Amino acid sequence: MIIETNNLCKRYGRVEVIRNLNLQVPEGSAFAMVGTNGAGKTTTMRTLVNIIQPDVGTATVLGKNSRSLTPHDFTQIGYVSENQVLPERLTVGQYFDYLRALYSNWDRALEKSLRSRMDLPPDRGLAKLSHGMRMKTVLVAGLAFRPKLLILDEPLSGMDTLTRDEVVEGLLDQADETTILISSHELAEIENFTTHIAFMDGGILYFQESIESLRSRFREVQVTLAARKDLPAHIPESWLLPEISGHSLQFIESDFQTRELLHQKLSEHFGAVQFDAEAMSLREISKVLIKKSRSIKVDAAA
């Protein structure tokens, strides 16, 4: 694993921002961390690059404890954040002149290619860049030295559609040689290159798995009942957000295996039924998980 955390915890006052986090990011993956605002994603990423230190537990990055990362280690780690600070007295060109001297593994040909694709004007002052142009600048800076690991904290936030497409194209070009850990609310844009996913909420990691596994087990189910029914008191735990009205039932199956097995479960609870089970996008699955986690919090507070 290129990243591995062991019972990682971080608290600010009475608020536990990360709770016993055990994250595993395979080398060569494009790993997405999703969840609500305040889920703990940014704190996790900052811990991985030693911007902040955990209160309990450890984080291992590139085989080393994150607290012990050296300047040489950081020549193998790219970090891009939507809140990244730039030296605004410099122009775009001067900024890249400065960065080249810091990395012995800097690839000028790649830099030139990325800057051309991202349409970054060398004479433009960093202070005068739009948010989207700033994010393209720091992304090129994070890619041009060909890091083994690239950590991206909401890199697509606030961008227009064209700018997001340009950024995603740049990431796709590097996905084969760089492990990418990304948090983003723009799930439709990252779904095409994501290989693994983790869902966090309230500092808790609920699951982590391959994107193929996630897609295979989630289905949106619409059921037509032979007779009017009420929702039974006991239904499978994998049936998320069930709603029933008259002859219609809908829910999300989070442990789909086969249509035959799902039909058997439905028949056991409702008798004769007809149903459709449709695959879901990453965005749709994420919305369901967020709604589910919110309902758990409401029930716990009641």
Image (cartoon, rainbow, N blue to C red):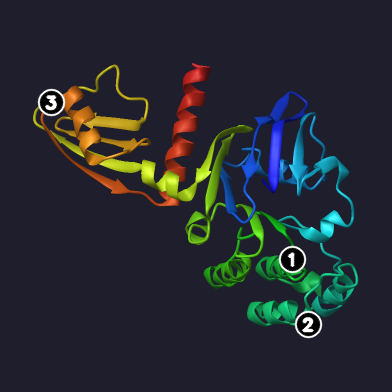
Q: What is the C-alpha distance between the residues marked 1 and 2?
A: 14 Å
Are circles 3 and 2 on residues that touch, CB within 8 Å? no
Residue 185 to residue 37: above or below: below
Residue 118 to residue 294: above or below: below
Nearer to the camera, 291 or 78? 78
Going by the numbered disc 1, the residue's amino acid type is: Val
Going by the numbered disc 3, the residue's amino acid type is: Gly
Q: Nearer the viewer, mark 3 or mark 2?
A: 3
Label 2 residue SS: loop
Expressed as whole percent of the image width and height from the top left, the position of residue 206 reads 54, 33
Q: Earlier in the sequence, mark 3 or mark 2?
A: 2
The numbered disc on residue 21 is none
Report whether 4 appears left or right of 299: right
The residue that disc 3 covers is 271
How many badges with numbers are in the image? 3
The numbered disc on residue 138 is 1
Nearer to the camera, 236 or 179? 179
Q: What is the C-alpha distance between the residues marked 3 and 1?
A: 58 Å
Q: Nearer the viewer, mark 3 or mark 1?
A: 3
The residue that disc 2 covers is 122
Expressed as whole percent of the image width and height from the top left, the position of residue 297 reads 51, 25
Nearer to the camera, 165 or 114? 114
Neighbor class of circle 2 (other Cα within 10 Å; few <14, some 14-19, many 20+) is some
Expressed as whole percent of the image width and height from the top left, the position of residue 264 reads 20, 30
Q: Quadrant of residue 104?
A: bottom right
Q: What is the C-alpha distance between the residues marked 3 and 2?
A: 69 Å
Label 1 residue SS: helix
Q: Is residue 3 visible?
A: yes
Q: Earlier in the sequence, mark 3 or mark 1?
A: 1
Going by the numbered disc 2, the residue's amino acid type is: Pro
* Residue pictured at 76% horizontal, 49% vertical: 62
